[in-house]
Amino acid sequence: MSNIVILVGSMRKNGNTSRLVQSFSEGAKKNNNVEIISVADYDVNPCIGCNSCFTREGNKCFQNDDMLQIYEKLKNADIVVIASPVYFYGISAQLKAIVDRLHTPMRNTFHIKKLGLLLVGAAELPNLFDPVIMQYQMVLDFFKLESIGTVLVRGVKDIGDIENNPALKEAYELGDSMY
């Protein structure tokens, strides 16, 4: 049984990204502990690159925001899943702020061994997700993490467009394969 933390980058509580996450989570909850962290529920400031976390006690960021709560949740994670709508060929700004705030020595205390990626985009472009996948692969390589897989969904723009999409089953099966 693994502890899975899903970082959801959509500000839409019931949007297509959330629906994809729900499907993955339903499969994963069969054999794992799953916690969903939605950017819509947390106030996280962007990293300013001051590197004070490298010298502060406990490697704590000087910014007093909700990232402290997210660090605590990530400390117990075995698997992290990044889920985001794709805006202008990247993850959402709110999720990027969280990812950037992981530039801290505190991350060395985490037990994360595996990473997954769930992406939703409105466009149908064949290379729509390439920039995010490149970053994902670089993170896997740098931190020596194992990929659990990706689910990439094109052509879903409006809330509910993802319903009846085969990607929901794919996400469920990916979640179900976690143990």
Image: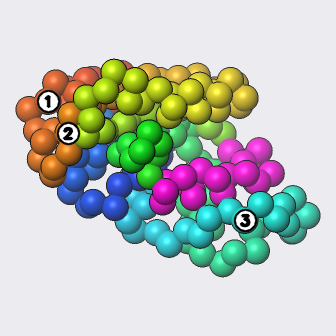
- The residue that appears at 46% across and 69% down in the rendered structure is 42
Foreground pick, 155 / 20: 155
What residue is shown with label 3?
48
* Extent of the magenta region: 93-110
Magenta: main secondary structure equals helix
**Label 1 amino acid?**
Asn
Mark number for residue 165?
Answer: 1
On the image, the x and y values in percent for residue 80 come to: 51, 40
Q: Residue furthest right?
A: 55
Query: Height in image: 64 above or below 123?
Result: below
Determine if the magenta segment contains residue 39. Answer: no
- The residue that appears at 16% across and 38% down in the rendered structure is 162
Mark earlier in primary sequence (2, 3): 3
Determine if the magenta segment contains residue 103. Answer: yes
Task: Say which quadrant the C terminus sits in.
Answer: top left
- The residue that appears at 40% across and 24% down in the rendered structure is 127
Name which quarter of the figure residue 110 lies in: top right
Decide if residue 56 is in sight here: yes
What residue is shown with label 2?
156
- The residue that appears at 27% across and 49% down in the rendered structure is 18
Mark 2 touching mark 1, by CB under 8 A? yes
Question: Left or right of 22: which side holds 58?
Answer: right
On the image, the x and y values in percent for residue 112 come to: 62, 37
**Label 2 amino acid?**
Val
Local SS, label 1 = loop
